[in-house]
Image (tube, coloured by chain):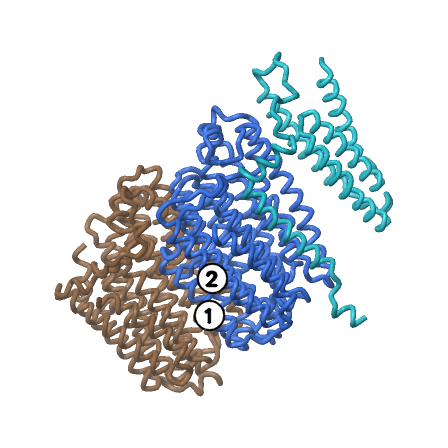
Chain colours: A brown, B blue, C cyan
């Protein structure tokens, strides 16, 4: 039952937020998200101690006539990580927003909580139809959020994002239907899918692979399906961008791990080199794009594409020692934490300076030391410097890529390594443009972090350093395949 | 059976109500009473037939499936009348007659759901159509309404002609109108022994049905008729009438012509492709919401055609039931908002969410359902009809094509949501919604959401 | 060739000729008159098939009542060949092609369903006397009583419709 609460609490909390009205909205949202975090923490505890395992899965018949069950389960390290990330992210975002509240708060927080419910559902679903349902349901609140809050060009941009993902997911639905139709006793359960998917002939698998992969690739996004992303990140309100970039893109990676590789193994191996090529192109291309951006949000958006590209490549590396996949798992969590920290910093800069343009910034280090400390540390984690959380994952992913069964593994690894260097270039460039240099009339009045922001960033920095020093905390979770 | 009788009688009652009841309120209440009574009677019918099918006069076979469909369609009609009764009365002077015609149409609906004889099919389609020609033209002052009526009548008469000719040819081949009779069943047992007259007969019936459900390329009347008719009647024509023709369609083509599906499946497939393309792409270019909904109803018909296409699959029967209910409720919900507006263009909806949050919310739920977003009934409706085709294993590409078209449909449905929520404007109202209206609309939206979680509720 | 066959062919020839006349004549009044003639010929066919009642009803109702009414309406509307809208050539061409295709299919279907029947004389006079008024009545009130009754709903709705469309709205009257 515990696991059901993980979805129900934010869902009901979100609905309640609409009814409670504007006054209560903020407190209610923080309370609900903290409650969700507490439940996620309990679930993590149960999982790590391997007790109360019945609480970690939930099964009840849903639409019996077509063999679909309402089946949720927190059965592996990856879902624990993603639930932990989702649980952690929302309270952090909410608390960091205390100073600058959006208009019509109850709508904003209500939609955010609904999105959280949908996202948690995606990570827990063990039934293909249920998975699809949550996949779409998570999208709708985000669509409304991005369209209602954000830059002047937000409506068409968000719609582009919506149409991209909607097309992808519809095609995915057809693929799921086709696999479902092969199941001997018609069933949508993950186990049935895995056993039937494996037995499909390679020719079928190879086109089913693309039907599924395109949906996930659009979400991640992998080059060349990424064109919606920089615009959407730039135009959405920053708290929404956090959700988009820290969790929603992970949905794509998560779906590949859960719903593509085990179900369509032959197809995945068949197309491995193509996918790796796309990922690696994405890494280099996005890194180069990031270097020339003048808009800080676009810069981070491209950096996100580069990181995701590397994770996707690691997942598809099929290394003999599993290091690649495990590294990607760890990095999915860590990247979520880092990018959340970066976006919170961006939103602080954006709110205080009223601009997203890097050229109008500079010299903040002189007047806002706390801000600068946070910016530097989180950026370094983003580059994956040793002793930050990013390092272990990045190292394992490159290692995995190097040990890949692909014939072109050397080339891919070298180019991906280049991506890591490029990421240092653009991230350090960003720090320099934001924090150093001369103060100008805009930045001169910049106030340092307030207490609530400082606390949130301290939490994030704490996680970064803790996991940097003691990566085993995550390794234990992903070690058991 | 009782529902057929009662709907006919209540039509007459409504005519007398117009004679004796002076106040328009009373007439409306009589109509509402009638539809509730009809609902009760159809539930009783269902209980009577839930054990075994029964044949009446060798003309009608009422089984669980038909009587269950009758309940659902009556419930949709009840929802329609509850929401629209004031608007129907406001169309013109002859409100009692409008209600009478609606009850006559319901009589036709029941006939179409349960016929087992081609004669009844013909009579059902005619009883369904003739009142619609009148309702389309009931706004006599409006030249567009006149045009709609005349266009509908001429085209409808033509398609009836084709229907009759098709029946004649099939009669010539089989020697019987009774679709359960040995001669009839024997003729359509296998493709090789089928007479060439039957081929042409099936083709003509297909064309005629395609016309009635506005499948392309026989859809040309639809936009003008739906757009020109008074807004109070458009949802009735686009939903209840259309889906009952679908049930008649599926009944004949699955039960009787199911074994010879090779003869007509390719025709349906091309109809589906054309309908989806024309419906969706043309809807994108519309500026008026009412006209957009007309094209959307063509596009949705394309999806419903999938249930005809997937021969003898239980998923298809379930799909058409669910699709009928969900599509009807969603369209009724959208039209209920449209009719409250002064300006039917997209710009007329700008800022509705601020001014009338309830209307905007219910319209959004209905539109999401029409797109087929999960958690709304529309998702499962599309799911069932599409999976029926996937299950069949042939023509998978058409399913992929259909979902791409569904993505196009997202464009024009979401455009309304965009206008309501993200744009600022005045959203001038024609009539202010009462609390009663809002309650009904919320109920409607809740049913759609409920069916999005538990679609099995409509399978009976 | 016996007398029945000769009559059949002559009647068919005339039916087709008049039917073509209906659509070919520019003047609507001529069209209606041709249509009446067509109905007469069809009634002739009914007589050949021993369905006298149908033949009479066809003449009285269609040719007599409805068509005369039509004639009046057309005369009142004062239509003539000048007011006939000109269709563009492409539409006409498409119409001819699709109509021709349908005709081809129908002819082919009928032709192929006749294979095996060549050489046999098709008996124009069926021995059945179902078309006689007494038998017709019996069948109508026994086997087909349900459609017969249901048709009343159809006619009722058509009647109501005619009244709704034809009646002048009283409010308008007083306003004028």
Considering depth in this image, is A129 or A437 the residue closer to the camera? A129
* Residue at 61% in and 44% down: B218
Q: Find numbered disc 2 in the image and state the secondary structure of the residue it sits on.
A: helix
Q: Vertically, is B96 above or below B208?
A: below
**Which label was assigned to residue B368?**
2
Question: Quadrant of the image for the C terminus of chain C?
Answer: bottom right
The structure residue drawn at horizontal position 36% and vertical position 73%, both measured from the top left corner, is A14
- Residue at 52% x, 44% y: name it: B272
Q: Please tell me which residue lies in front, A407 or B26.
A: B26
Q: Is residue C155 left or right of residue B42?
A: right
Task: Count residues near mark 2 (Cα–Cα under 10 Å), then give few for <14, some for 14-19, many for 20+.
Answer: many
Image-quadrant location for residue B339: bottom right
Image spot of residue A199 (x, y percent): 27, 40
* Picture residue at 58% right of the left edge, 48% below the top: B214
Q: Which residue is mark 1?
A: B442
Secondary structure at badge 1 equals: helix
* Viewer-side label of 2, 1: 1
Q: Nearer the viewer, residue A292 or B335?
A: B335
Chain letter of the residue carrying label 2: B
Report the side of A84 relative to B439 (left or right). left
**Distance from label 2 to label 1 (Cα)?**
15 Å
> Residue B428's quadrant in the figure?
bottom right
Residue A38: x and y, percent? 23, 74
Q: Please state the horizontal and vertical placement of residue B288, each as a whole percent of the image.
A: 63, 62
Most foreground residue, B333 or C4: C4
| Vertical comparison of B73 with A358: above or below | above
Callout 2–callout 1 Cβ contact below 8 Å: no
**Residue B357 left/right relative to B157:** left
């Amino acid at each position: 039952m515990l696991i059901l609460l993980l979805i129900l609490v934010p869902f009901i909390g979100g609905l309640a937020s609409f009814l409670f009205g504007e006054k209560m909205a903020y407190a209610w949202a923080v309370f609900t998200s903290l409650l969700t975090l507490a439940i996620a923490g309990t679930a993590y505890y149960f999982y790590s101690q391997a007790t109360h395992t019945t609480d970690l899965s939930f099964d009840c018949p849903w639409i019996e006539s077509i063999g679909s069950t309402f089946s949720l389960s927190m059965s592996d390290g990856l879902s624990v990580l993603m639930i932990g990330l989702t649980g952690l992210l929302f309270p952090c975002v909410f608390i960091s927003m205390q100073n600058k509240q959006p208009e019509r708060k109850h709508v904003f927080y209500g939609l955010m909580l609904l999105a959280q419910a949908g996202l948690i559902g995606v990570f827990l679903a063990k039934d293909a139809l249920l998975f699809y349902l949550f996949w779409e349901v998570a999208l709708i609140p985000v669509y409304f959020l991005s369209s209602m809050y954000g830059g002047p060009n937000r409506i068409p941009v968000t719609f582009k994002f919506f149409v991209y993902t909607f097309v992808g997911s519809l095609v995915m639905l057809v693929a799921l239907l086709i696999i479902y139709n092969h199941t001997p006793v018609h069933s949508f359960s993950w186990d049935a899918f895995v056993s039937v998917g494996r037995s499909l002939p390679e020719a079928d698998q190879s086109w089913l692979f693309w039907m599924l992969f395109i949906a996930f690739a659009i979400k991640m996004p992998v080059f060349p399906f990424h064109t919606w992303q920089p615009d959407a990140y730039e135009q959405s309100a920053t708290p929404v961008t956090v959700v988009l970039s820290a969790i929603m893109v992970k949905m794509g990676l998560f779906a590949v791990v859960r719903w593509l590789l085990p179900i369509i193994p032959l197809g995945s191996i068949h197309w491995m080199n193509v996918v790796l090529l796309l990922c690696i192109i994405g890494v280099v291309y996005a890194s180069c794009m990031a270097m020339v951006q003048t808009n800080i949000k676009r810069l981070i958006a491209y950096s996100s594409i580069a990181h995701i590209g590397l994770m996707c490549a690691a997942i598809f590396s099929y290394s003999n020692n599993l290091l690649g996949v495990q590294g990607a798992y760890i990095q999915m969590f860590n990247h979520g934490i880092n990018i959340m920290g970066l976006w919170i910093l961006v939103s602080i800069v954006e709110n205080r300076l009223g601009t997203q343009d890097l050229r109008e910034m500079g010299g903040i280090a002189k007047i806002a030391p706390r801000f600068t400390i946070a910016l530097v540390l989180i950026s370094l984690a983003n580059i994956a410097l040793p002793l930050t959380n990013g390092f272990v994952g990045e190292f394992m992913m490159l290692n995995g890529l190097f040990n890949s069964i692909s014939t072109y593994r050397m080339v891919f690894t070298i180019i991906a390594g280049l991506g890591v260097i490029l990421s240092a270039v653009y991230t350090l460039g960003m720090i320099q443009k934001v924090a150093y240099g001369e103060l100008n009339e805009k930045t001169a009045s910049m106030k340092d972090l307030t207490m609530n922001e400082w606390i949130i960033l301290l939490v994030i920095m704490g996680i970064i350093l803790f996991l940097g020093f003691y990566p085993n905390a995550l390794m234990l979770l992903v070690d058991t395949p | 059976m009782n529902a057929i009788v009662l709907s006919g009688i209540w039509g007459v009652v409504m005519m007398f109500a117009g004679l004796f009841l002076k106040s328009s309120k009373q007439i409306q209440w009589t109509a509402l009473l009638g539809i509730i009574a009809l609902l009760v009677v159809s539930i009783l019918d269902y209980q009577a037939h839930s054990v075994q099918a029964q044949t009446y006069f060798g003309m009608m076979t009422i089984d669980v499936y038909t009587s269950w469909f009758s309940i659902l369609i009556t419930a949709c009609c009840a929802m329609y009348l509850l929401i629209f009764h004031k608007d129907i009365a406001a169309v013109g002077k002859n409100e009692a007659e409008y209600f009478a015609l609606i009850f006559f149409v319901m009589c036709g609906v029941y006939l179409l759901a349960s016929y087992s004889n081609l004669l009844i099919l013909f009579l059902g389609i005619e009883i369904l159509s003739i009142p619609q020609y009148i309702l389309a033209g009931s706004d006599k002052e409006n030249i567009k309404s006149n045009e709609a009526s005349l266009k509908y009548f001429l085209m409808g008469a033509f398609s009836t002609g084709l229907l009759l000719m098709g029946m004649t040819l099939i009669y010539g081949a089989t020697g019987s109108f009774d679709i359960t009779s040995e001669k009839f069943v024997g003729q359509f047992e296998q493709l090789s022994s089928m007479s060439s007259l039957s081929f042409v007969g099936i083709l003509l019936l297909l064309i005629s049905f395609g016309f009635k459900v506005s499948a392309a390329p026989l859809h040309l009347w639809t936009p003008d008729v739906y757009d020109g008719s008074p807004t109070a009647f458009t949802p009735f024509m686009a939903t209840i009438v259309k889906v009952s023709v679908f049930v008649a369609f599926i009944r004949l083509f699955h039960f009787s012509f199911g074994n010879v599906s090779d003869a007509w499946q390719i025709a349906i497939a091309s109809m589906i492709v054309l309908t989806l393309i024309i419906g969706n792409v043309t809807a994108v270019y519309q500026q008026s919401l009412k006209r957009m909904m007309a094209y959307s109803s063509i596009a949705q018909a394309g999806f419903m055609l999938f249930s005809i296409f997937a021969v003898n699959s239980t998923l298809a029967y379930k799909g058409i039931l669910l699709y009928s209910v969900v599509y009807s409720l969603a369209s009724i919900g959208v039209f209920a908002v449209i009719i409250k507006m002064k300006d039917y263009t997209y710009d007329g909806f700008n800022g509705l969410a601020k001014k009338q949050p309830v209307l905007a919310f219910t319209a959004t739920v209905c539109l999401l359902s029409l797109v087929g977003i999960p958690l709304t009934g529309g998702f499962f409706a599309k799911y069932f009809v599409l999976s029926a085709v996937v299950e069949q294993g042939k023509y998978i590409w058409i399913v992929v094509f259909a979902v791409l078209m569904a993505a196009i449909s997202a464009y024009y449905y979401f455009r309304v949501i965009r206008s309501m929520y993200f744009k600022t404007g005045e959203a001038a109202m024609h009539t202010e919604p009462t609390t009663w209206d809002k309650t009904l609309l919320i109920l409607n939206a809740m049913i759609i959401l409920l069916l999005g979680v538990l679609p099995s509720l409509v399978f009976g | 060739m016996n007398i029945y066959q000769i009559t059949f062919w002559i009647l068919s020839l005339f039916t087709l000729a008049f039917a073509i006349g209906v659509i070919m004549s520019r003047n609507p009044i001529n069209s209606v008159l041709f249509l009446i003639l067509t109905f007469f010929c069809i009634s002739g066919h009914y007589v050949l098939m021993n369905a006298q009642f149908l033949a009479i009803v066809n003449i009285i109702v269609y040719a007599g009542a409805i068509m005369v009414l039509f004639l009046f309406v057309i005369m009142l509307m004062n239509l003539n060949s000048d007011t006939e809208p000109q269709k563009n050539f492409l539409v006409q061409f498409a119409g001819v092609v699709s109509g021709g295709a349908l005709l081809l299919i129908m002819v082919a279907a009928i032709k192929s369903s006749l294979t095996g029947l060549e050489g046999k004389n098709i008996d124009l006079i069926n021995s059945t006397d179902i078309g006689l008024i007494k038998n017709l009545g019996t069948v109508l009130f026994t086997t087909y009583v349900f459609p017969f009754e249901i048709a009343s709903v159809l006619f009722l709705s058509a009647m109501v419709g005619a009244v709704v469309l034809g009646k002048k709205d009283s409010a308008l009257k007083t306003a004028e």
